Image (cartoon, grey):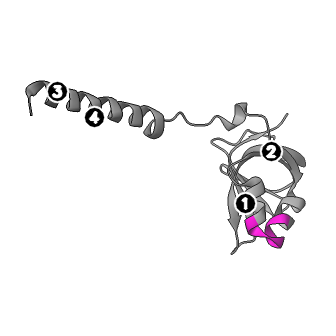
């Protein structure tokens, strides 16, 4: 094989590697706070959907931006628990906003069967 052929093959491999890196490996992180919620649901309805059929609930909610409504039952560090059914994780919990009834937007990351809780991350409290 000639030097020209080797250079062409190396060039194609470098180009393919760059496309793979940019298109598949290097993706910007989703900004859930800027996204519009795909669904709005009460915490009790969300938990009931998971308890009834986790597979169907995953198809409906998993990795989607959703808005959950309910009453705060616990707030500590960067977590808020809504109606003892939905655990919402925040980067930093906003002061004095984790009381009473709330609407929280976040990404559904699944159901914890052991504790019977639905988990959300990247949450924000809706004003």
Which badge, 4 or 3, comes first in the chain's sequence? 3
Separation of disc 4 and disc 2 at Cα? 46 Å
Separation of disc 3 and disc 2 at Cα? 55 Å
Do we see residue 7 in this rendering?
yes
Q: Residues within 10 Å of mark 3 (few under 14, many from 20)?
A: few
Separation of disc 3 and disc 1 at Cα? 48 Å
Which badge, 3 or 2, comes first in the chain's sequence? 3
Separation of disc 2 and disc 1 at Cα? 19 Å
User: Between tags 3 and 1, which lies in front?
Assistant: 3
Do we see residue 84 in this rendering?
no
Disc on res. 104? 2
- Residue matched to label 1: 58
Please provide percent x and percent y for residue 69: 88, 49
Please provide percent x and percent y for residue 1: 9, 34
Q: Magenta residues, as a range?
A: 49-55
User: Between tags 3 and 2, which lies in front?
Assistant: 3
Q: Residues within 10 Å of mark 4 (few under 14, many from 20)?
A: few
Task: Inspect the magenta stretch and tell me whether residue 67 lies in it.
Answer: no
Tag 1's secondary structure?
helix
**Residue at image location 73% in from the left, 45% down from the top:** 106
- Residue matched to label 3: 7
CB under 8 Å between callouts 1 and 4?
no
């Amino acid at each position: 094989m000639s030097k020209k052929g080797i250079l062409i093959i190396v060039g194609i491999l470098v180009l393919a590697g760059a496309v793979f890196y940019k298109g598949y490996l290097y993706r910007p992180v989703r900004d859930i706070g800027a996204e519009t919620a795909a669904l709005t649901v009460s915490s009790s309805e969300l938990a009931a959907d998971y308890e009834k059929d986790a597979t169907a609930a995953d198809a409906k909610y998993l990795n989607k931006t959703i808005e959950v409504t309910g009453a705060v039952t616990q707030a500590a560090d960067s977590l808020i628990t809504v109606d003892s059914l939905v655990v919402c994780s925040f980067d930093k919990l906003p002061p004095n906003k984790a009381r009473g009834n709330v609407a929280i937007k976040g990404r559904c990351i699944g159901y914890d069967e052991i504790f019977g809780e639905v988990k959300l991350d990247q949450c924000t409290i809706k004003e």
